[in-house]
Amino acid sequence: MKERLFTLAIMLILFLYLWGWSEICLGHTLNMQTLKDVSNYSKLISDDDGSYGSGLVLTLTLTLTNKHVCKTSDQLKVSGKTVTRKWLSKKFDLCIVEHSPRLKTITPEFTTILSSQQKVFVAGYPEPFMQLTTCTGIVLRFSITMQHSLGSITGILVSNKVRPGYSGSPAFNFRGQIIGLTTGRLNPSSFGILTPTKDILAFFKEIKFNWGKTP
């Protein structure tokens, strides 16, 4: 009897472990056509000096990223496509770059709805390999302020462990909606800080960005 109970307990623990692991790895309720579609949203942004970051493709020729990724360079490329113009926010660590030729994309859906402990999925190009990488976490705080190279920034604190190169990478909920853009990290934990969707939408208004039209 004791051996049977022990076996059942082990099976239950194994089941719970595998269920939790599958939720982390597969997204459980992730509403994108598996992780392969992430490459249509997140792109590598590189500079001739060897620095790089990530970006969220908005349209065939426009990509959203952080201002600190693109501010100091005129030699940027998005997935190898040369950047021809850029629009920098006066208020937020955000920037839109225009590139040619066109990139394949899926029009992103933004949401401002957040809940505590909500699962978050980040996709970007961290060091050292500059390959599309994903990491999962949860919302820890709706608002946190930190000092940054461009000054003080306020954003959403998530438990996703971000590394250099993740700057500008999109953050999704598990419905596939954009909840923010990875902007920094809180040391020494490396927890990510996201520029929230409300600030992204405010930036779009700032530069008069409309879908399908250049600012």
Image: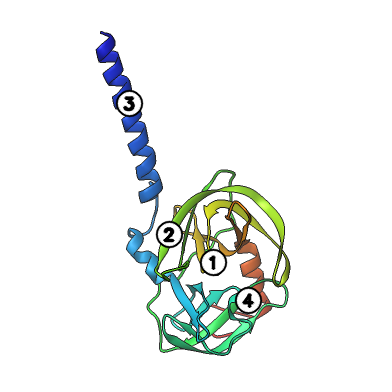
Q: Position of residue 6 (x, y in %)?
A: 30, 17
Instruction: Check disc 2 and report its element: helix, strand or loop.
Output: strand
Between the C-alphas of marks 4 and 1, the distance is 15 Å
Circle 1: residue type: Pro
What's the distance in space between the residues labelled 2 and 4, CA to CA?
22 Å
Q: Residue at x 68, y 53 (%)?
A: 143
The answer for how far apart the CA atoms under marks 1 and 3 are is 39 Å
Name the residue carrying label 4: 67
Local crowd size for mark 3, using a 10 Å CA cut-off: few (<14), some (14–19), many (≥20): few
Q: Mark 4 and mark 2 in contact (Cβ < 8 Å)?
A: no
Eyeballing the image, is 182 above or below 89? above
**Camera-side residue of 135 and 175:** 135
Q: Which mark is residue 164?
A: 1
Dot placed on the residue nearer the N-terminal end, 2 or 4: 4
Residue 118 percent coordinates (x, y):
53, 46
Q: Is residue 65 above or below residue 178?
A: below
Q: Are marks 1 and 2 in contact (CB under 8 Å)?
A: no
Q: Which residue is mark 2?
A: 134
Disc nearer the start of the sequence (1/2): 2
Residue beneath disc 3: 12
> Which one is nearer the viewer's eye here, 112 or 119?
119
Q: Residue 24: x, y in percent?
A: 40, 46
- Judged from the image, the secondary structure of the residue bearing numbered disc 4 is helix
Q: How many marks?
A: 4
Residue 215 position by quadrant: bottom right
For the N terminus, the quadrant is top left
SS for tag 1?
Answer: loop
